[in-house]
């Protein structure tokens, strides 16, 4: 694509360097502590900083260098200056005067021999930011040689007596590319692929890349026997085989999730922001920062539907829901998205794309710029900066056509704009591509880097099959023209659940159009949007009548029929009939 400005991560490095101090390499200094040689507990501590002058992030790791497990740990060290803790993650951080104490969380309590864990903290300071040189774990000094000034220590070989520094130093930041999809393969999720391949004709698409949804805390380690994040990343390293590979993740577990609907309500209640940050985002950030994965290009879709809901489904709008009013008032969507951006974006090889709903939701003037502005607010909250955002994704898990080939927003019928038709209803856009391109520009206006790009989820927006128009309809009446020309055959643009008549859309593709980084398959075809009747479950999922084919609708879909397929299982569960429907109606045809 034709974006010409510097990549965001480079822009940030340049900015930092222009500030108070110029640091070696990519702005990090590191201190390695070698293991204590005394018997009993043996430890090594890695300490490196990303310093922007007046403040810094300390990336710290503790390695068990002994031969017995450490079960519960407290790291202590002291600063010589006025460094002041502002926030910490992946451990409990406290400070008393110059002394800093960091203790384990439940999930990183045990360190097997040779095992390590990484965590981080943000600090303010003035004057000089001298790195601490003495660390202790459970009171035992991790003494030994000290080295400074090497941001990326070379891994030691297996005969080295000291633990490999590669386990205690996060990957270098600074080498994000403009469009991660260009020149790269994309990870094929073996679990989805196997399910698709087991369907009749499923092998037509089973080798396509789809996203991995981290839709609950348990998904990080693998819920119900399925692959966890590390298992996916290990498999991705194999698939990469030394070449660039994008791995697509969906970050999806905000407190009070899915506030305008019920089908994808989540496990965390509206006020569970601490759990979101420390039991969900922190462990993901820790895994992603494992140097074993530093060559993967991690692309995150950040929290589908969350910020758009705060724009459109809140009081005094007629579309308001009590749950969205709660999430707006308590700020936890904005806080959580900011936290996710800051902590995932802090990993050097992560690309974050914020979710912008789809054109049939945010494409109206009242919703469009306010969504971009709210994204900017989130991207400057909880320590995030615009450099933590590489773009926007449109149509996640939705059905809006990528392009409408037979009519445009500028068409008129007998002098009246198609914007006045029932279907368009004053929207500014008729398809996802024109929407995503314009939204990208709106983000730049709102303060994001000019290098941001857009993704479009094309997994289920194909609209082929027998009912697809083959050309523009006659311009006899306004609604007749629009309804006869549109390829999107939904009853209403607001319909979102297991849509009847939908097909597989454009195959995943890098840089397909100006401003578009890629067509991607984020919603895995064959996974349900929601159950068509109430089903008891332990995932927090509710029953939304938008998934019931007999439902006659609500204010958010113009009181239209839901258009949903019958007999659907819970959101995320395999729905064979939908998979078949999607294959049948694929466009382009398979
Ligand atoms: C569900 C998730 C699922 C995702 C992908 C969402 O609607 O709530 O549980 O992982 O879809 O299928």
Image (cartoon, rainbow, N blue to C red):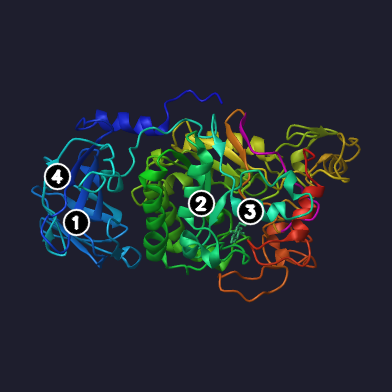
Query: Of callouts 2 and 3, which one flags the residue occurring earlier in the amino acid sequence?
Result: 3
Tell me if residue 555 can be seen. yes
Q: CA distance from mark 2 to mark 1?
A: 30 Å
Crowd around label 1: few <14 · some 14–19 · many ≥20 (10 Å): many
Q: Secondary structure at mark 3?
A: helix
Q: Earlier in the sequence, mark 4 or mark 1?
A: 1
As for residue 511 lying within the magenta part, the answer is yes
Residue located 72% across and 42% down the image: 505
- CA distance for labels 3 and 4: 46 Å
Disc 2: residue Cβ within 8 A of ligand 1's nearest atom: no
Q: Earlier in the sequence, mark 2 or mark 1?
A: 1
Residue 372 can be seen, yes or no:
no
- The residue range painted magenta reads 498-512
Residue 123 picture location, percent across and down: 22, 49
Q: Which residue is mark 2?
A: 232
**Mark 4 falls on what kind of element?**
loop
Label ID, residue 131? 4
């Amino acid at each position: 694509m034709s974006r010409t400005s510097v990549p965001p991560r480079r822009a940030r490095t340049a900015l930092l360097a222009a500030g108070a101090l110029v640091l070696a390499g990519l702005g990090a200094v590191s201190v390695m502590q070698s293991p204590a040689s005394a018997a009993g507990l043996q430890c090594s501590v890695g300490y490196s900083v990303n310093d922007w002058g007046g403040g810094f992030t300390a990336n710290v790791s503790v390695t068990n260098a002994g031969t017995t497990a450490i079960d519960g740990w407290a790291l202590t060290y002291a600063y010589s200056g006025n460094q002041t803790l502002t926030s910490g993650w992946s451990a409990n951080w406290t400070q008393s005067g110059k002394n800093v104490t960091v203790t384990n969380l439940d999930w990183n309590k045990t360190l097997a021999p040779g095992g390590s864990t990484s965590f981080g903290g943000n600090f303010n300071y003035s004057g000089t930011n001298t790195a601490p040189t003495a660390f202790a774990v459970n009171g035992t000094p991790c003494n030994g040689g000290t080295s400074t000034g090497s941001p990326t220590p070379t891994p030691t070989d297996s005969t080295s007596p000291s633990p490999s520094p590669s386990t205690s130093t996060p990957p270098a930041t600074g080498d994000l590319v403009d469009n991660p999809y260009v020149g790269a393969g994309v990870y094929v999720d073996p679990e989805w692929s196997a399910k698709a391949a087991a369907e009749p004709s499923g092998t037509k698409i089973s080798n396509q890349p789809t996203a991995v949804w981290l839709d609950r805390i348990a998904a990080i380690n693998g819920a119900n026997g399925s692959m966890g994040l590390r298992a996916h990343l290990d498999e991705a390293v194999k698939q990469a085989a030394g070449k660039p590979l994008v791995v697509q993740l969906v970050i999806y577990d905000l407190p009070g999730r899915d506030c305008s609907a019920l089908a994808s309500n989540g496990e965390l209640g509206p006020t569970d922001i601490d759990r979101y940050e420390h039991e969900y985002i922190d462990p993901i950030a820790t895994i992603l920062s494992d140097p074993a994965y530093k060559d993967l290009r991690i692309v995150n879709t950040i929290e589908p539907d969350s910020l758009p809901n705060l724009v459109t489904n809140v009081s005094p709008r007629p579309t308001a829901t009590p749950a969205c009013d709660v999430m707006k008032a308590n700020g936890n969507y904005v806080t959580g998205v900011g936290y996710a951006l800051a902590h995932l974006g802090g990993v050097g090889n992560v690309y974050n794309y914020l979710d912008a709903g789809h054109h049939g939701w945010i494409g109206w003037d009242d919703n469009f710029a306010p969504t971009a502005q709210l994204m900017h607010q989130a991207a400057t909250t909880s320590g995030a900066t615009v450099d933590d955002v590489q773009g926007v994704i449109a149509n996640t898990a939705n059905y809006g056509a990528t392009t409408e080939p037979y009519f445009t927003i500028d068409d008129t019928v007998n002098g009246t704009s198609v914007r006045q038709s029932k279907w368009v209803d004053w929207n500014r856009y008729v398809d996802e591509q024109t929407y995503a391109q314009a939204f990208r520009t709106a983000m730049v206006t709102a303060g994001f880097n000019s290098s941001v790009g857009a993704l479009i989820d094309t997994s289920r927006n194909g609209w082929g099959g027998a009912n697809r128009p083959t050309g523009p309809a006659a311009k006899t009446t306004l609604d007749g023209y629009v309804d006869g020309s549109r390829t999107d055959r939904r009853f209403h643009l607001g319909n979102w659940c297991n849509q009847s008549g939908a097909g597989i859309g454009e195959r995943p593709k890098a840089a397909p159009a100006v401003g578009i980084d890629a067509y991607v398959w984020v919603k895995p075809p064959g996974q349900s949007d929601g159950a068509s009747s109430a089903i008891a479950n332990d995932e927090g999922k509710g029953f939304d009548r938008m998934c019931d084919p007999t439902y006659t609708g609500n204010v958010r879909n113009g009181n239209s029929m839901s258009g949903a397929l019958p007999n659907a299982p819970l959101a995320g569960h395999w729905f064979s009939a939908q998979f078949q429907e999607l294959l049948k109606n694929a466009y382009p045809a398979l």
